[in-house]
Amino acid sequence: MAMPRAAVIAALACALGTACAGGDTEDASPPRAQAPPPAAAAHDADPQEDSGSSTSQRNDELERAARDVVGFLRGEVAFERLRLADTVTLYLAPESGGGSARRAREELRDLSRWRVHTGDPGITYLFIPPERLTKLTTRVGRHLDCREYPLASRFPALARLPHVGTMLEPHMPESCLATWNLTLVFAARPGPPTLVAAVFDQWEW
């Protein structure tokens, strides 16, 4: 007996692999290619590189602040450009007797107040450099006195703070003794460098 037309169509569908009632289906098509993961960043941030960049930037700030102070003492930079603590302590090197003086910020607007009396009666050293000394050298984290030294060799407590050694000498120096040396010490806090102390170490002048 002939099969109904619908049954014939269903049988052909099963034979061709299409869905049959009551059976499981399986997709035999090849798997779709998955999208590749996002490209990795060229490189991850290097903490040491960031730290080195931050240190270099801070050193530049300290050096500029030191140059501004020296410029003020030479009469070339306005007082308003300086960042000074409420009180700044001025020191002389131990060779001079180790004298010191505390000055209020506004007091230091007057160049004549950048001075320290030593232990010897009547001896005063003014921090103002001679006009003929025009060549400026700066060293962050060092103390200059003709040559470079660690500030800890003079003032261990100050050496723990950020500091910049500065030296003025003639354009054509004949001797390293013909120099003016001032180490500028700054507060250990974020933000623009703020001067808290200054160490004068060429007291022969």
Image: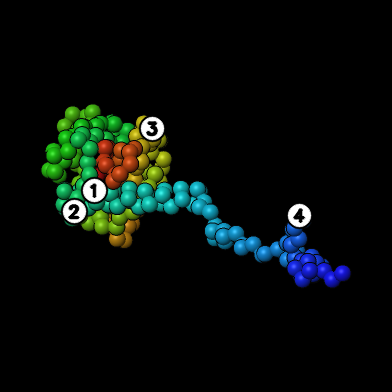
Closer to the chain start, of discs 1 and 3, is: 1
In the image, is 41 to the left or to the right of 132? right
Mark 1 surroundings: few (<14), some (14-19) or many (≥20) residues within 10 A = many
According to the picture, the residue beneath numbered tag 1 turns out to be: 69
Closer to the chain start, of discs 2 and 3, is: 2
**Residue 156: which disc?**
3
Residue 61, how many percent across, how many down? 32, 50
Look at label 1 and name its amino acid: Val
According to the picture, the residue beneath numbered tag 2 turns out to be: 77
Residue drawn 32% across and 57% down? 173
Look at label 4 and name its amino acid: Gly
For the N terminus, which image quadrant?
bottom right
Kind of element beneath mark 2? loop
Q: CA distance from mark 4 to mark 1?
A: 93 Å
Disc 4 versus disc 2: nearer the observer: 4
Residue drawn 22% across and 37% down? 85
According to the picture, the residue beneath numbered tag 4 turns out to be: 22
Residue drawn 41% across and 48% down? 55
Look at label 3 and name its amino acid: Pro
